[in-house]
Image: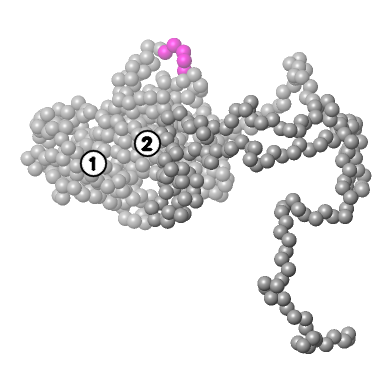
Amino acid sequence: MSARPPRERASERPERFERSERPERAERGYGDRPQTSRPPRERPAGRPERAERPDRSERPARPAFRPQRPERAAERDHGDRPQAARSRNRIDAALERSEWGDPREPRDTRFEAPERAARPARSGSRPERSERPQRPERFGNDRPPSRGGRPARASAPREPKHERPPFDPDTFVPEPKVVVPKAPLPTAVEMAVVTADEAGMRVDRFLEARFEGLSFSHIQRIVRKGELRINGKRADSKDRLEEGQTVRIPPLKLDAPKVGGGVLSEAAQKTLDAIKEMIIFEDADVMVLNKPAGLAVQGGSGTVRHVDGMLEVMRDAKGQKPRLVHRLDKDTAGCLLIAKTRFAATKLTGSFRERSARKIYWALVAGVPKPKQGRISTYLAKEENEEDTIMRVAQHGDEGASHAVTYYAVVETSAQKLAWVSLKPVTGRTHQLRAHMAHIDHAIIGDPKYFNKENWQLPGGIQKKLHLLARRIVVPHPRGGFIDATAPLPPHMLQTWNLLGLEADRFDPIENAPEE
């Protein structure tokens, strides 16, 4: 431990100077700094003397501020700020002194920079480029050593860039393409197992994907005969497959591909003309036909003439024909939607599956439904007998039962014996409208399957045909927008409307019915 010196006594301390008796410090300027004892640095022989900076008084005056737009300057002037704060802003100060003019007038020359020729020349002159010392040229890896004293890292020489040889058509050999052959058509009964990629597909799409060129009518024929089975049970073309299921495929027959673009025969030309007469809407992707009553949509047992067969005459150069998007009963007239391309068929089928397509039907029924507007919700199941197949009202949970919903509205009546009814189906079950109207005891006039009223006679002059019309269809277009097509009354319904005095242009209350 070092001994600490004792503190001086107060009597021994020197007396402090009063403030007035302190020696005054010598005031010195910025340039009156004392010189150090270090000798001045010697300038290189080749470097010229630095030019002296002119005095502040000799420098040219600079503008006080750059002119700005008056509206921006006015926005900065807030009335709640004190006058001293506003004066700090040079732009506001200039506005207060009325130094700003109209922005549309020429700029004030006071704010213009002096011309280059009018500027004072510098006292010192920069040496010419030829008099400057040249840097030594470096070759290859001759790098100077780094500041740390370590030698510079030598970079490896770069490899020359590989250039692709020019294309020579004589020696060019194309790469072989891997072609996956399609599955051959089975000549005997075949059992196919549904894979994970095929899960969720419809039965008809499953067959079309496996066997290219298989016609739709052929698929419907084997389904209708019960030759196509899933896990031993009869299958419908709309059934969805699940992974691991076994599909029994009967012997199939491939139709010969037909390519359009050639000269049509006389019969084919008549068929084409008949289709053109039915068209009520057409573009590059979609076609809406006004199907007459009595013409089947698809082929069946004993059916020779149908819409699907008539579309064969409209095959394009690639051999593709228009496709059916939905179906109508043989005795139902009205709007039938046709897809002319594969792209349109996929989009329109999805619209029907998602129930975004809106369909309106007109019908003439027996009696007047009460209430005049309502909703019919039942389960329908297919019932087959020896003569025909009909849809019956079933219970929830019955085998093959599907939920069906229909909205109806009475448009006009005739002597409380007949009623003009507008129908909007939410679901699309087979014979849905006909079965629903018979279920509420108001069957459609002229229906040979579901009209069950005994001792009921048609008024004179009304034809005994099904009075059901697919009046209107509204569906999203595959390219955007909507397709909205309306079909006129068929001849037999128009005759009935005129006989009963019904006005076809009356307001249809089904427009306000819900969509679900």
Quadrant hosting residue 308: top left
Residue at position x 78%, y 83% from top? 13
Decide which of tag 2 and tag 1 comes sooner along the chain: 2
Quadrant hosting residue 391: top left
Q: Amino acid at mark 1?
A: Glu
Q: Which mark is residue 476?
A: 2
Q: Is residue 128 above or below residue 449?
A: above
Q: Is residue 391 visible to the viewer in this orientation of the structure?
A: no
On the picture, is 483 further left or further right than 227? Answer: left
How dense is the environment of label 2, judged by Cα within 10 Å: few (below 14), some, or many (20 and up)? some
Whether pointer 2 and pointer 1 mark residues with C-beta atoms closer than 8 Å, the reply is: no
Residue 127 picture location, percent across and down: 80, 29
Q: Which mark is residue 162?
A: none
Residue at position x 77%, y 81% from top? 14
Q: Amino acid at mark 2?
A: Pro
Residue 118 picture location, percent across and down: 62, 28
On the picture, is 101 further left or further right than 62? Answer: left
Helix, strand or loop at mark 1: helix
Between 142 and 466, the residue placed more toward the observer is: 142
Residue at position x 41%, y 34% from top? 102
Between 38 and 67, the residue placed more toward the observer is: 38
Residue 252 picture location, percent across and down: 52, 32
Between 421 and 99, the residue placed more toward the observer is: 99
Q: Is residue 262 magenta?
A: yes
Q: Is residue 466 visible to the viewer in this orientation of the structure?
A: yes
Residue 2 picture location, percent across and down: 88, 85
Magenta span of residues: 260-264
Q: Which mark is residue 511?
A: 1
Q: Is residue 5 above or below residue 136?
A: below
Task: Report the residue that reaches farthest toward the left.
Answer: 415
Between 308 and 135, the residue placed more toward the observer is: 135
Q: Is residue 400 above or below residue 228?
A: below
